[in-house]
Image (cartoon, rainbow, N blue to C red):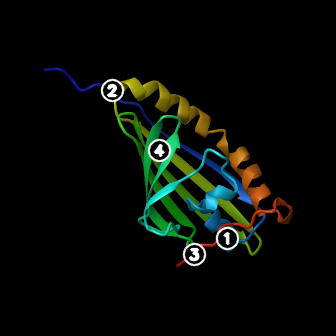
Amino acid sequence: MNSPPQLAHVSTTFRFQLAAPLARVAPLFGPEGERCWAGKDWDPHFLYPQPARDSQGAVFTVQHGPRTSFWVNTAFDLAAGRLQYVAVLPDAFLNVIDVRLNPIDATHTAVEVTYTRTALNPAANEDVTAMGTADRDKGPHWQTMIEACLSPQSGQAPAKNQP
């Protein structure tokens, strides 16, 4: 009897702080809110809800070159600073992205992001391992991009979320 192939599974957490209150920071971690800071390749296309809005249960796609990943927002509690996504690139890997935001004081928020990545077939093992390694270094980049979005000089207002 053959044993099943080994599939890569990595979990990586990074942390940083932002000089803004939780209420201002939390909306920036929704798929629409991320447009302010995540770069030109972050272009979610909502399947649900319509019209598009950041909410628990939202389902959307993101293009990665010729491939499409499918995302589900599994937790979206801005007041509690808790957001989570499950993203699948079919036949490649599944990612769980867990975001936890905690107020440090009235004007500062601690951010903790955990990526858990699992290969869906052995051919993706190397990619999953490489992404897990790269995840460790994302904190400073995310912090810089979000701070630019929060800056009044950015010319971009953080996305407004509908209830």
Sequence-wise, which precedes: disc 3 or disc 2? 2
Q: Residues within 10 Å of mark 1 (few under 14, many from 20)?
A: many
- The quadrant holding residue 125 is top left
Single out the residue that lies furthest toward the top: 2
Q: Amino acid at mark 3?
A: Ala
**Above or below, comparing residue 40 to residue 99 in the picture:** above
Real-space Cα distance between discs 3 and 1?
8 Å
Real-space Cα distance between discs 2 and 4?
16 Å
At a point 67% along the width and 47% down the height, the residue shown is: 39
At mark 4, the secondary structure is strand
Real-space Cα distance between discs 1 and 2?
40 Å
Whole-percent x, y for residue 156 in the image: 76, 63
Q: Residues within 10 Å of mark 2 (few under 14, many from 20)?
A: few
The mark found on residue 22 in the picture is 1
Task: Check whether the beta carbons of the residues at disc 3 and disc 2 lie within 8 A of each other.
Answer: no
**Above or below, comparing residue 105 to residue 99 in the picture:** below
Which residue is identified by label 4?
116
Task: Check whether the beta carbons of the residues at disc 2 and disc 4 lie within 8 A of each other.
Answer: no
Sequence-wise, which precedes: disc 1 or disc 2? 2
Single out the residue that lies furthest toward the left: 1
Which residue is identified by label 2?
6
Q: Amino acid at mark 1?
A: Leu
